[in-house]
Amino acid sequence: MSFAAQIKIPATYMRGGTSKGVFFHVADLPEAAQVAGEARDRLLLRVIGSPDPYGKQIDGMGAATSSTSKTVILAKSTQSDHDVDYLFGQVSIDRPFVDWSGNCGNLTAAVGSFAISNGLVAAERIPENGQCTVRIWQANIGKTIIAHVPISNGQVQETGDFELDGVTFPAAEVQIEFLNPAEDEGDEGGAMFPTGNVVDRLDVPEIGSFQVTLINAGIPTIFLNAEEIGYQGTELQDDINSDVEALARFEKIRAYGAMKMGLIQHIADAETRQHTPKIAFVSSPRDYVSSSGSRVAAAETDLLVRALSMGKLHHAMMGTAAVAIGTAAAIPGTLVNLAAGGGIREAVRFGHPSGTLRVGAQTALENGQWVVQKAVMSRSARVLMEGWVRIPADSF
């Protein structure tokens, strides 16, 4: 019996924020995978090592968490006034699908670096020293993102002293601006608050009835009050992820929230839309000990937030969810805003399982509707490995 040989595909393994993933230039992919479809999805699944019934992704580049089961495809931008088109694929760990429904805000921090280093940004726009402004078109949701990437001696500067909770080592700071993150969310449209309310009542059969803030900003997100669902907001990963019944409750709440947001037509559709919407719970500040063992004092934060990604509590915070947090915190009356003490705010520092993060948002009330001009946060990024990934030629 003969078996297919392995093929090799140019790729870069990068950390961006508190995530990492495999980055490709679209032109380096096999022709069948250069366009959306089954071939592309099967290729990315094989690269990452999914679906894996063992839940480990041993035979691939993934590391069996939502933060590390990620892929990025980049190309010279087809949009005017942009440098690079950024397409993100969240790869399911134990199921055979790639979710294209949203962005990864953490990996956004690495997009600018990849674009500069791989010739996607015009040479005349790259300073010898200073910052290079990279204009990113986020193709999943049709949004503009601006990355300010540090440059030293004409090359991307990756090392530095910027510390990001959830990342072990310091690196160079990359400031990210998400422009108009709540306007016309992707093809599905909808206002920043899809129901028109900053707070709704969500009824979930056999689970309960909860206050929620449903928001489209950065990524569609469902916010709940921690105390209303039996938590304090100080929980770490094991407190949630070791509780199978709790995870099932969260997923059911998420599915009904997705229905109320108009993101799915049937509850069962949530099974193949794991990346969005996100679900998170908030509380007022409390002292707690982070996952690294560091003490986070209540006085260091404006509120506490815990968020789930792909069915598990995130070890830190998704970048796109941070945009939703910053935006909701800036708008009076949302659950996020009330947890932070109410009022109008331009920035908040929130506590997450790995520490704290500051995010700013510029919002305004126009014609009776809240709009957000941009959200800003700082992340970091670094190339971990570059070369080729190998997969069997018959994988796709």
Image: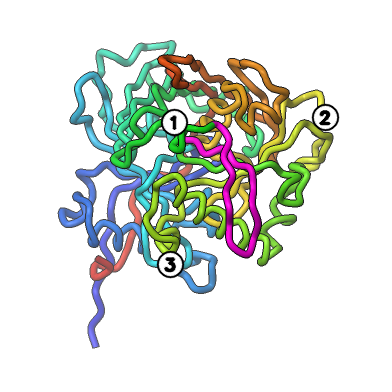
Q: Nearer the viewer, mark 3 or mark 1?
A: 1
Residue 79 is a magenta residue: no
Q: Residue type at mark 1?
A: Met
Secondary structure under tag 3 reads loop
Name which residue lies at 43% across and 33% down: 108
In front of the other: label 2 or label 1?
Answer: 1
Magenta residues, start to end: 198-216
- Determine if residue 162 is in view: no
| Residue 297: image tag | 2
Upstream in sequence: badge 2 or badge 3: 3
> Residue drawn 64% across and 48% down?
210
Crowd band around label 3 with a 10 angstrom C-alpha radius: few (<14), some (14–19), many (20+):
some
Residue 215 included in the magenta stretch of the image: yes
- State the mark number for residue 192: 1
Neighbour tally class for label 2: few under 14, some 14-19, many 20 plus, Cα within 10 Å: few
Q: Nearer the viewer, residue 65 or 183?
A: 183
Quarter placement of the N terminus: bottom left
The residue wearing badge 3 is 95
User: Is tag 3's residue or tag 1's residue first in the polypeptide sequence?
Assistant: 3
Residue drawn at x 18%, y 30% is 78
Q: Earlier in the sequence, mark 2 or mark 1?
A: 1
Give residue 140's quadrant in the image.
top left
